[in-house]
Amino acid sequence: MFDYISGKIAVVGENKLVVDCNGVGFALTASTHACAEFAGQNSVKVPVYLAVREDALELFGFSDEQERELFLKLIGVSGIGGKLAISILGGLPKDTLLSAIGRGDAAALSSIKGVGKKTAERIVLELKGKLEFIDDVVPDKSSVTAVDDKAVAALIGLGYERREAELAVKKVATDGMTTEEIIRAVLRGI
């Protein structure tokens, strides 16, 4: 029904965007990545998905078409609704999330708030090999970056905001540090 909404950003909150489209404010549930991307912009064109349920209509907004496609794949997994799919999209950087699904790394997925071991295993089982665009998104990553991503995910699980966790990890991480060492360094405030 809706493909995108364009207008001015009126409000950016945690997992929420309000786009003013000629005097009508559309409230969109969006990932933390999409909110961060649109936060500094004035005029935007946001890809959307309208979820129709028995008791509600809900608009979901995305940073780009690939994020929307990944969302659609996630809500196709048994037991995953729109809100959990948005949490998953915001729980890890997109390339890390796609890589984890492609590798079958349920442990990385279960580090996301709200995703348990069984849900992570179900995501891997149902989506592994079904993400055609994975090769276009996942760059070659050094082990340091993969460790950094796990540390960021762990800090988010401990209650840090995504941006705060990313900045803290960048500040303390050096070559050869393990995920645990990075987390300890951040928590000590080094």
Image (spheres, rainbow, N blue to C red):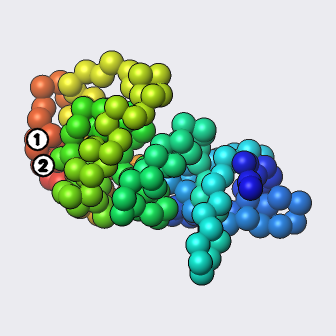
Question: Neighbour class for label 2 at 10 Å: few (<14), some, many (≥20)?
Answer: some
Quadrant placement of the N terminus: bottom right
Estimate how packed mark 1 is, as few (under 14), some (14 to 19) or many (20 or more) residues with alpha carbons within 10 Å. some
| Image mark for residue 181 | 1
Given residues 102 and 63, the one toward you in this image is 102
With 129 as the anchor, is 89 left or right in this view? Answer: right
- Tell me the quarter of the picture where residue 140 sits: top left
Q: Residue at x 60, y 58 (%)?
A: 60
Q: Quadrant of residue 13?
A: bottom right
Which three-letter amino acid code belongs to the residue tagged 1? Glu
Q: Quadrant of the C terminus?
A: top left
**Residue 181, above or below 84:** above
Query: Contact (CB < 8 A) between labels 1 and 2?
Result: yes
Image point 28% across, 44% down: which residue?
124
Give the percent coordinates (x, y) of residue 108: 23, 45
Describe residue 78's horizontal placement relative to residue 5 as left or right.
Answer: left
Identify the residue shown where x is 22% and y is 27%: 144
- As drawn, is 189 to the left or to the right of 139? left
Reading the image, the residue beneath label 2 is 184
**Residue 122, position in %: x, y?**
27, 52
Badge 2 marks a residue whose secondary structure is: helix
Q: Nearer the viewer, residue 84 or 21?
A: 84
Label 1 sits on a secondary structure element that is helix
Give the residue type at disc 2.
Answer: Arg
Give the image location of residue 5, x and y in percent: 75, 52
- In x, y percent, where is residue 89? 43, 49
User: Considering only vertical position in the picture, is 6 above or below 130?
Assistant: below
Res 171 visible: no
